[in-house]
Image (cartoon, rainbow, N blue to C red):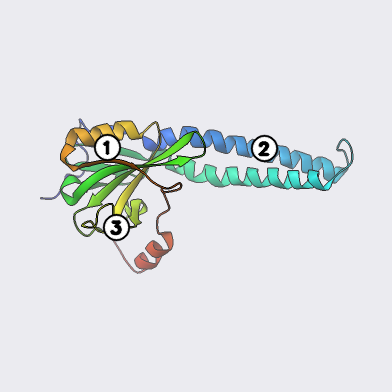
Amino acid sequence: MLPPHAPSPNATVIRTGRRNAVAGMSCSVFLIAVGILGVAGTVLVSTGNQQGESTAGGYVGLIVMLALGALGVFFLIPIWKGRRIMVSIDHTGLWFHNGTAQNVISWHTLAGVGLYWSEFGRRSKLYSLELCPNGPIDRDDPVLWGLVRDEEPPHPTLPRLRYRLPLTAATYRPVVAAVQQYVPQLWLGESQRESGHIGVPDRKGHLKRTRSRTY
């Protein structure tokens, strides 16, 4: 039986992109502000209007400030694009909306769902919802491909490919609560992973595999 084309009206909706954007944009704006100060400092040095003599340490400091500003711009673009990402959870499955289109990971295609978390700095943590399939999945689905990870499975009987939904401290609780509400039998619990466990999707492989593929 094919899943419906949209979540049910009473689905639990978590706007993960909006919540992530608030925190991410604050950090990016700070880095950009540092970069602007670096630009101002560079202008003063180049025109000879700086206070005191220029030193090697001062030049290094300006370069670092400019690099941080560029990093802020680099992070701001994907954060802004991802502000419309949201997740809807109902009796059918977990619906992922990437900002322009959506698809569903149906419960009947999963063998288990769990939560991973890892340390991020001294006071922060990164979370991810791990959706382990009970069979093959389309790793190049137009909507879901960015969630696919190829790693050692949490259990030897499970396939390597699975979906990983990155979450934050503000979004993981409602997502976990909704999963436990609809499919408590699939819940695998939570476990700590190594730092940086979120990883990145296989962009190069995806582009290579889909170069001649049409949907």
Q: Position of residue 14 (x, y in %)?
A: 32, 33
Judge whether 30 appears above or below 162 on screen.
above
User: Considering the numbered disc 3 on the image, is that residue within a helix, a strand or a loop?
Assistant: strand
Sequence-wise first label, 1 or 3: 1
The residue singled out by tag 1 in the image is 88
Toward the left, the furthest residue is 1
**Quadrant in which the C terminus is drawn:** bottom left
Residue at x-position 55% and y-position 36%: 27
Disc 2 to disc 1, how far (Cα)?
37 Å
Q: Nearer the viewer, residue 161 or 9?
A: 161
Sequence-wise first label, 2 or 1: 2
Q: Give the residue type that dot 2 points to.
A: Val
Disc 1 to disc 3, how far (Cα)?
22 Å
Q: Check if mark 2's residue and mark 1's residue have beta carbons within 8 Å.
A: no
Q: Nearer the viewer, residue 29 or 6?
A: 29
* Badge 2: residue crowd in 10 Å (few <14, some 14–19, many ≥20): many
The residue singled out by tag 2 in the image is 34
Q: Give the residue type that dot 1 points to.
A: Ser
* Badge 3: residue crowd in 10 Å (few <14, some 14–19, many ≥20): many
Residue at x-position 20% and y-position 36%: 90
The residue singled out by tag 3 in the image is 161
* Badge 1: residue crowd in 10 Å (few <14, some 14–19, many ≥20): many
Sequence-wise first label, 3 or 2: 2
Residue at x-position 48% and y-position 42%: 79
User: Considering the numbered disc 1 on the image, is that residue within a helix, a strand or a loop?
Assistant: strand
Q: Check if mark 1's residue and mark 3's residue have beta carbons within 8 Å.
A: no
